[in-house]
Amino acid sequence: MLVSHSRDVAASTAELAKALVGTGDPAPVAAAGGLPDGSIGTSAELIRQAIKDVDGGKGVVVLCDMGSAVLTVKEILNAPAEDGVPKDLRIADAPFVEGAVAALVTASVGGDADMVISATDDARSYRKV
């Protein structure tokens, strides 16, 4: 699940990650970017819907771009279960694009939430030089 301040950034990152999965069916991925009117910001309403869209009962890993996106997801994490928040909802501490690709590839080959978080941890420490 991808949370960005921009609808376009979230959607494009989701599309890139799906394209890089390769053959086969990618795991569910949803993007919650911007505000409902399309402007820049974060929306708890859009994030909650995206969580519901990808929750298959195996856990949901969320990648956030920065700042209030993280704070909004943390608020959702503290919400009671009757609000539809899955018990195994986690925030990945990873770069947005690299983490999204690592998460989706890992989930698409059957990785559970622990494996997905581990893959995003690896993405965080990947050196480019």
Image (spheres, rainbow, N blue to C red):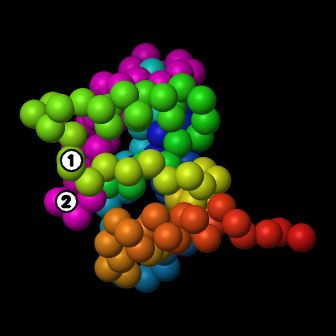
- The residue segment tinted magenta is 36-59
Residue that label 1 marks: 86
**Quarter the C terminus occupies:** bottom right
Count the marks. Answer: 2
Going from N to C along the chain, the mark reached first, 2 or 1, is 2
User: Amino acid under label 2?
Assistant: Gly
Closest to the observer, 27 or 113:
113
Q: Is residue 45 magenta?
A: yes
Q: CA distance from mark 2 to mark 1?
A: 9 Å
Examine the rendering and report whether any part of residue 70 can be seen. yes
Q: Secondary structure at mark 1?
A: loop
Examine the rendering and report whether any part of residue 108 can be seen. no
Depicted 113 relative to depicted 75: above or below? below
Residue 98 in which image quadrant: bottom right
Residue that label 2 marks: 56
Q: Position of residue 7 (x, y in %)?
A: 51, 33
Depicted 92 relative to depicted 42: above or below? below
